[in-house]
Image (cartoon, rainbow, N blue to C red):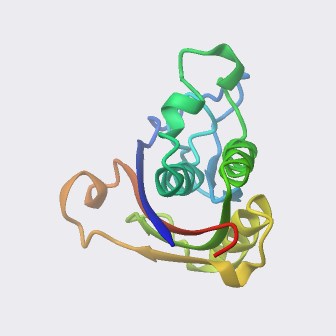
Amino acid sequence: MRVGIGYDSHAFAPKGKAKGPKGKARKLILGGVEIPHDRGLTGYSDADAVAHAVTDALLGAAGLGDIGRMFPNDDPRWKGANSIHLLNQAFLKVVEAGFQFVHADVTIIAEQPVLAPHVDAMEARIAEALLAGPAHVSIKAKTNEGMGWIGRGEGIAVLAVATLAQHGD
């Protein structure tokens, strides 16, 4: 068994100025799900911090580096990229390296918006990208109890742990 830890955080774009890569209002995407909110997250891709943290956890468990090495933000191919697609591409590299996905556990830390109604959909989207059933992905949402930059509503942070097995184990 191999275990990897992933972390990602993104700031919320300023109200009324949140533009995505195609000039449209930036949407809040977490775990591949569009979450109704007045602001999206800033980032080079779609800024899906859940998908980014899970990607890093998988790559770390497999000893394959991190998301920034695989999909550098100075490469125009990844501008505005769908992070679920990037997660799937990273997962396929993990499989090529001889590993089987077992489980991912994710904690999203955000004051707003309320994420509980979207957890099942996020679990399903992440699991789909990993060619697994939703029972192999666990997502929880927590607040920071008003403390720090997250508590002030400046952004969102995500922690993820992924477990892999080597083929044949």
Q: Does residue 133 sit above or below 148 in this rendering? A: below
Rendering quarter of residue 111: bottom left
Rendering quarter of residue 25: top right
At horizontal 69% and vertical 52% (from top left) the residue drawn is 91
Q: Judge by depth and name the residue closer to the eye, 24 or 69.
A: 69
Q: Judge by depth and name the residue closer to the eye, 136 or 99.
A: 99
Q: Residue furthest front?
A: 168
At horizontal 54% and vertical 15% (from top left) the residue drawn is 74
At horizontal 53% and vertical 53% (from top left) the residue drawn is 62
Q: Does residue 113 sit above or below 123 in this rendering? A: above
Q: Judge by depth and name the residue closer to the eye, 107 or 112.
A: 107
Q: Judge by depth and name the residue closer to the eye, 163 or 124.
A: 163
Q: Does residue 39 sit above or below 152 in this rendering? A: above
Q: How many marks?
A: 0
Q: Position of residue 2 (x, y in %)?
A: 48, 66
Q: Is residue 108 left or right of residue 62?
A: left
Query: Dividing the image into 4 quarters, which one contains the C terminus?
Result: bottom right
The reply to whether residue 159 is visible in this rendering is yes
Q: Position of residue 13 (x, y in %)?
A: 47, 36
Q: Residue furthest bottom?
A: 135
At horizontal 57% and vertical 51% (from top left) the residue drawn is 55
Q: Position of residue 94 (x, y in %)?
A: 65, 51
The reply to whether residue 18 is visible in this rendering is no
